[in-house]
Image: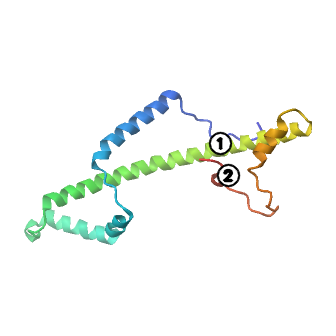
Amino acid sequence: MPFENLNSVHFIAAEKTSVATHLAALEATLMPKVKNLSAEERQKYGSINEQNKLIVNKARDYRTSQPTLSSPDVDWVEFQNDFDSRDFLQSTILRLQNMIDGLSNNKILHDFDNYQAALTDYDYAKYKASTKVAGFENKVTAIGQFFSRTGTASAPAKTVDETATS
């Protein structure tokens, strides 16, 4: 083979079905509790920064260690429920993000492998077209339309993400 196969680990049908089934179950579990925010709402509520998380944590610490100093105007049961939910969501997001990163990395490798194989196939088609074998001229024309004709030798090469399709 003229190119290096960077990722030859593939999913079998049973694994694909299992992943889809588990994702559907996860979606079904989360959907009743997930809120969709508009762009304006996301801007309005935002997310608290690290400094403000320290304020929340300190208020919780005081509530836990010295409850008599806590405001009676705060629903502390709801405060704790929000705190616990936020903690659960944050750890879940981190776990999911790690999975997303791993999946994205593997997709990049498969995209690169596909692109390199497609380039090898295109070079083969150009060779066969030069020998006047029937059908290869059409293939070269069909694939060749995706290559820029205006670039120069010093133009930067496109990355895999720019050249491979999603």
Q: Residue furthest top?
A: 14
* Residue 49 coordinates in the image, percent (x, y): 35, 69
Q: Where does label 2 land, which residue? A: 163
* Residue 120 coordinates in the image, percent (x, y): 77, 41
Judging depth in this view, the residue of 6 and 154 nearest the camera is 154
Image marks 2 and 1: residues in contact by CB distance under 8 Å: no
Q: Is residue 130 left or right of residue 73?
A: right
Q: Is residue 85 left or right of residue 163?
A: left
Q: Secondary structure at mark 1?
A: loop
Asked if residue 17 can be seen in this view, the reply is: yes
Total marks shown come to 2
The type of residue carrying mark 1 is Leu
In the image, what residue occupies the spot 91% across and 40% down? Answer: 130
The type of residue carrying mark 2 is Thr
Number of other residues with Cα within 10 Å of mark 2, as a class: few under 14, some 14 to 19, many 20 or more = some
In the image, what residue occupies the spot 77% across and 39% down? Answer: 121
Q: Secondary structure at mark 2?
A: helix
Q: Residue furthest right?
A: 131
Judging depth in this view, the residue of 132 and 110 nearest the camera is 132
Q: Quadrant of the N terminus?
A: top right
In the image, what residue occupies the spot 33% across and 65% down? Answer: 41
* Residue 83 coordinates in the image, percent (x, y): 23, 58
The mark nearer the N terminus, 2 or 1, is 1
Q: Where does label 1 land, which residue? A: 6
Asked if residue 47 can be seen in this view, the reply is: no
Q: What is the quadrant of residue 132 in the picture?
A: top right
Which dot, 2 or 1, sits closer to the camera? 2
Number of other residues with Cα within 10 Å of mark 1, as a class: few under 14, some 14 to 19, many 20 or more = few
In the image, what residue occupies the spot 24% across and 65% down? Answer: 57
Q: CA distance from mark 2 to mark 1?
A: 17 Å
* Residue 67 coordinates in the image, percent (x, y): 10, 65
